[in-house]
Amino acid sequence: METIWIKNPLAIYTGNEQDARGGIVVRENTIVELVALNATPSSAIDSVVDANQHVVTPGLINAHHHFYQTLTRAYPDALNKELFHWLKSLYPVWANLDQEMMSVATELALVELMRSGCTTASDHHYLLPTGLEHAIDLQVDAANALGVRAIFTRGSMSLGEDEGGLPPRHTIQTEQTIVDDSKRLLRDYHQAGDGAMIQIALAPCSPFSVTTDLMKETAHIARQENVMVHTHLCETIDEENFCLKQFGLRPVDYLEDVGWLNHRTWLAHGIHFNSEEIQRLGKAGVGVSHCPTSNMMLASGMCKNLELEAAGVKVGLGVDGSASNDGSNMIAEVRMAMYLQRLQYGSAKVSHFDALRWATKGSALAMGRHDIGELSPGYQADVAMFKLDDIRFSGSHDPLAALLLCGAQQADRVMVAGKWRVHDGEVIGVDLQQLLARHSAAAKRLATLSAAAKS
């Protein structure tokens, strides 16, 4: 059991009030000690990592993503459209996904996230066409191979266009198929308790793509199994209008009606809530993943982060899909969150500390995790380390503020569960050029298949 001292960082954000300017001590997969400035650890140390050139943070936590969308970045048919029209352009493309595409898209998204300081990634996968029924299994394999912590949300679509939903019928599954596979994934992969590396949550895609019965059954399973549930909610006004027309309810009322208004729920986007709804969400202990870049790209609106937090909502951060971002860079997303929220509240009310909180402890709590998101004794040893040696940082004075204000893009070192997974900016054990070649080939093949199906 090696004990590692990450010593004397240039700057450190712990997510708590304790002095850790002397660094942190890690044993096995856990943080065991915070070292004050000019102090030495009380533990016997086996190895020292000199962090005097690094800004150290908890590993960043991505609370919402769609890994498969790395294959359709800047896709011509989907350019310059808002959410519903954007989705209708891409659903027929994504219907051609196969196992190789899914595997390489997942690996690339995870590598991109890890390189940007992310140690826990949640993915919402809801497209399981014929031949890709075991997409989540492929994702679990990829995460295990890379050694990254992951929360895979078993997404689903059951309400086709012919029934008033948004997705085409060939992209949906029957409710019984969805329920059976959800239970299988929980049985085979879900790890409960502190230190879990792989978790499964249940995630009907959205009110406009699943039936009310499926939402209710999902809530029932989640209660039985004590697992989290996740969905898109209140991303656009179009969604609000859909809920009013289809169910006679506003989205939050619908959420309560189907048994989702509770602490096991976290929502993606959460933009169009009124004041009364924000209070209800906070009282219920619901979490929200803010997705700033995607919300700007699709012109969906701005999440009300400060009102949500004040009401008790657990606010986290997600990069969202790589076809609506169009990237998977977590540290870049932290900067974007800070700036978008400043545009809403003013620069004096939103600091770099707020943005870092959303990307660490906020995301952890939103997804029901109490063992990650802080650099504190007893927490998992998930650590991101950034150098400020690029030209963009020259002349900066406050290292922690510079991390966001000057626009960090890549971590130098990343530790997950006490093991180094990124060193000198590269994911250990990954041939990046080979991965890029596989991924590029898969993206081109997907576009070719889609064009052929369209013609």
Image (cartoon, rainbow, N blue to C red):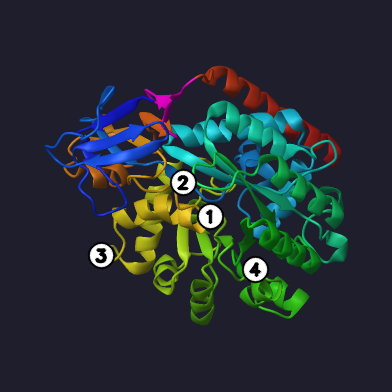
Q: Which residue is mark 2?
A: 61
- Residues under labels 2 and 4: Cα distance? 23 Å
Instruction: Look at 19% across and 41% down and name the residue there.
Output: 21
Q: Which residue is mark 3?
A: 348
**Sooner in the amino-acid sequence: mark 3 or mark 1:** 3
Residue 381 screen position, x and y as percent: 39, 37
Residue type at numbered disc 3: Ala
Residue type at numbered disc 4: Trp
Corner quadrant of residue 263: bottom right
Instruction: Look at 45% across and 68% down and name the residue there.
Output: 304
Label number found at residue 367: 1
Tell me the crowding category of disc 4: few under 14, some 14 to 19, or many 20 or more residues within 10 angstroms, Cα based. Answer: many
Q: Which residue is mark 4?
A: 260
Say if residue 174 shows up in the picture: no
Tell me the crowding category of disc 3: few under 14, some 14 to 19, or many 20 or more residues within 10 angstroms, Cα based. Answer: few
Magenta stretch: give its range.
Answer: 417-428
Give the number of the mark in front: 2 or 3.
Answer: 2
Residue type at numbered disc 1: Met
